[in-house]
Image (spheres, rainbow, N blue to C red):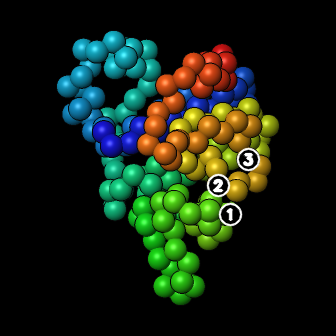
């Protein structure tokens, strides 16, 4: 598991809550291998998960996340790699390492589910998910992006924000 990405979508239009946890690099076989652990067991017993979810090609974190969250394949949403060069314009996407990666541009032509939910007046909170910093219109109500300094969010302040947003 190389990257943990969490997205919490709270208070969906009909007041139900949706918590979406995306774990890059966690295959179904790994999920079942560790299903004896309480966290995994809880998801298996009380959550919803699919045995029919398959990675898209190319099988990289960002194209797969964006496909999951937009419902369309990379050839439609345009995120075909974690690093992309638009040879026509010279524009580069460098996996959220430069400010231009977050600009609402050709890279972000299709709204993901959390933007659609925000447009529908749902309260949306996103945690540890770099896409929440994209210049979406409208933006999510709460965005706590992943740290870029190699440190973790181990302080109680962030944990309290996560808990409060998902109540």
Left or right of 98? Residue 21 is left
Q: Residue at x 57, y 35 (%)?
A: 127
Mark 1 / mark 2, whichever is N-terminal: 1
**Depth order, front residue of 91/17:** 91
Mark 3 / mark 1, whichever is N-terminal: 1
Total residue callouts? 3
Residue 142 position within the rendered picture, expressed as x and y whole percent measured from the top left: 70, 36
Q: Residue 33 occupies which quadrant of the picture?
A: top left
Residue farthest to the right, as pictured: 121
Mark 2 / mark 3, whichever is N-terminal: 2
Secondary structure beneath disc 1?
Answer: loop
**Depth order, front residue of 32/14:** 32
Q: Residue at x 66, y 33 (%)?
A: 125
Residue 5 can be seen in this image: yes
Give the label on residue 139, or none: 3
Secondary structure beneath disc 2?
Answer: loop
**Depth order, front residue of 39/91:** 91
Give the label on residue 134, or none: 2
Pointer 1 and pointer 2: residues touching (CB < 8 Å)? Answer: yes
Q: Residue at x 70, y 26 (%)?
A: 11
Q: Residues within 10 Å of mark 1 (few under 14, many from 20)?
A: few
Q: Quadrant of the C terminus?
A: top right
What whole-number distance in Å separates the C-alpha atoms at marks 2 and 3?
8 Å
Residue for badge 1:
104
Residue 2 position within the rendered picture, expressed as x and y whole percent measured from the top left: 33, 43
Q: Is residue 148 above or below residue 29?
A: below
Q: Residue 19 occupies which quadrant of the picture?
A: top right
């Amino acid at each position: 598991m190389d990257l943990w990405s969490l997205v919490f979508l709270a208070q969906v239009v009909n007041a139900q809550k949706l918590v979406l946890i995306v774990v890059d690099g966690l295959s179904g076989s790994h999920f079942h291998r560790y299903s004896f652990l309480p966290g995994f067991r809880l998801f298996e017993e009380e959550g919803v998960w699919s045995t029919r979810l398959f990675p898209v090609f190319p099988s990289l974190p960002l194209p797969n996340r964006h496909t999951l969250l937009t419902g369309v394949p990379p050839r439609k949403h345009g995120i075909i790699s974690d690093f992309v060069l638009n040879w026509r314009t010279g524009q580069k996407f460098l996996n959220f390492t430069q400010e231009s990666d977050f600009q609402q541009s050709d890279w972000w032509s299709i709204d993901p589910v959390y933007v659609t939910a925000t447009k529908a007046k749902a309260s949306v909170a996103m945690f540890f998910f770099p896409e929440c910093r994209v210049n979406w219109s409208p933006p999510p109500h709460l965005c706590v992006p992943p740290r870029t300094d190699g440190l973790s969010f181990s302080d109680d302040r962030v944990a309290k924000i996560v808990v409060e947003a998902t109540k």
